[in-house]
Amino acid sequence: SQKLPPGSRGLPIIGQSLTLLQVMKANTAKQWLEERVKKYGPISKLSLFGKPTVFISGQAANKCGEDHKRVRGALISFLKPESLKQYIGKMDEEVRRHLEMHWQGKQKVTVLPLMKTLTFNIICSLLFGIEKGARREELIKCFQAMIGGMWSIPINLPFTRYNHSLRASSRVQEMLKELVREKRIELQQKGTSSHQDLITCLLNIHGKDNEEALSDDEIVHNVMLVMVAGHDTSSVLITFIVRLLADDPTIHAGVVQEQEDIAKSKSSGELLTLDDLAKMKYTWKVAMETLRMFPPIFGRFRKTLKDVEYGGYLIPQGWQIFWATSMTHMDANIFQEPSKFDPARFENQATLPPYSFVSFGGGLRICPGYKFARIETLVSIHYLVTQFRWKLCYTDNSFSRDPMPIPTQGLPIQIEPKKLL
Ligand code: HEM
């Protein structure tokens, strides 16, 4: 078919970007997309962030195609189960240190920014070997500024959010290039060791003639991808679980019971293990239901490398494709009573239709950090519920998206320490 999908591309450059950003902020983006589907059907054209785009919805749209195999391969081998096993103890230490520094002795904390700090520190220290200190502090500041403008209108004028984000991104790239140079020297001097960080692992990928397969720029961009993908998401998940546990005494009691049973089976100061995580089945179901209702990633963009025919329409080469998680997660044909929070839906995951739970994406580019995120979330919730009781400072349950969901004021809570078990 040579027929382009229906729909208008709006004003030049701006297209529908401002509307999308507005509805994300007001948390009405799902309704806005539903209106589009009613008006144009499940495939429609529009223009987002300066690019012609096709919005697609429905389970089939969540499956995706081609991949940059080399880098992804390295990433997957890096995040393989044997490596993840070693990370549990380190994550345990990071979480405890974080709670000691930022939670203990306090009566009130704001959860979202603290969780961002925690998950960024975990990624930096576990994946990149960047331990605490001035470099990590500067990196986190620049990263937040960069992420702040990632979904903004691409107008590069002084004082625009986009311009601020680009400048922060240049500084992040400079710092990471420096780190790549240091790691290369270390690798040449010491050779490979059994436990490497991700940058060393990427430096170690070689081509046919034994030359380094990835340029410094490629390494830096992949490191940035992992840093963004790996900390902004899990921090949102943990924050929304904290909010939910404050709101729902029954679910709270179930999680506390499971985690206290595990805590009681351990001696004081003993680190959590893979076996302990395997016992946290109920807590993980609560996390999955949280991800279904409040997916950190609202939707994803792809770019067509060639003309694609989809659902009877032509999507021309070079256009963007945009799909939205909630369109599937809130579909009553897949999840009955979709607005009800019910962890029991994940009792038997095999019964869910394919590509219906897509918080981690679907198909070839599915999130490679899924297991890492699971460990990080379970370890954090374990220490939070066994060490603290909390109450929400605001009872309003709304949130806005920028593009990640942000609960009112970043979720301030009143906390009270529990007696250690
Ligand atoms: C709750 C936590 C997380 C959620 C909800 C999440 C979600 C996602 C989603 C929706 C995608 C896009 C998949 C697609 O395009 O089809 C993605 C990609 C990715 N995620 Fe995650 N993620 C999480 C945690 C992590 C962590 C902890 C890491 C790293 C340690 C990570 C690394 C990545 C990377 C590198 C990609 C890009 C993969 C590619 O393009 O091939 N994520 N994630």
Image: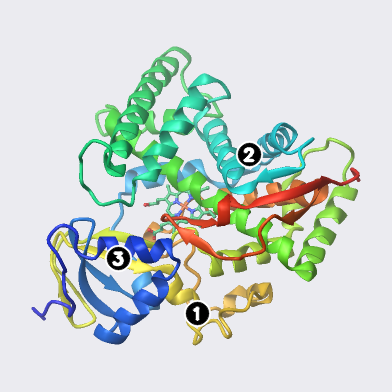
Look at the numbered discs 2 and 3 and tell me whether their residues touch, using CB distance below 8 Å: no
Mark nearer the N terminus (2 vs 3):
3
Q: Is mark 2 within 8 Å of ligand 1?
A: no
310 relative to 105 in the view: left or right: left
How crowded pointer 3 is (Cα within 10 Å; few <14, some 14-19, many 20+) is rated as: some
Check disc 1 and report its element: helix, strand or loop: loop
Locate the N terminus by quadrant.
bottom left
| Kind of residue indicated by mark 3 | Thr
Instruction: Write down the residue under mark 3.
Output: 19
Q: Nearer the viewer, residue 286 or 29?
A: 29
How far is disc 2 from disc 1 in space, using C-alphas? 32 Å
Q: Residue at x 75, y 33 (%)?
A: 100
Q: Where is residue 11 drawn, in percent x and y?
A: 14, 64
Decide: is 316 above or below 179: below
| Kind of residue indicated by mark 1 | Pro
Mark nearer the N terminus (1 vs 3):
3
Check disc 2 and report its element: helix, strand or loop: helix
How crowded pointer 1 is (Cα within 10 Å; few <14, some 14-19, many 20+) is rated as: few
Q: Nearer the viewer, residue 253 or 154?
A: 154
Instruction: Write down the residue under mark 2.
Output: 87
Look at the numbered discs 1 and 3 and tell me whether their residues touch, using CB distance below 8 Å: no
Q: Residue at x 42, y 65 (%)?
A: 362
How crowded pointer 2 is (Cα within 10 Å; few <14, some 14-19, many 20+) is rated as: many
Q: Where is residue 123 drawn, in percent x and y?
A: 53, 37
How far is disc 2 from disc 3 in space, using C-alphas? 42 Å
How far is disc 1 from disc 3 in space, using C-alphas? 32 Å
Q: Which mark is residue 353?
A: 1
Look at the numbered discs 2 and 1 and tell me whether their residues touch, using CB distance below 8 Å: no
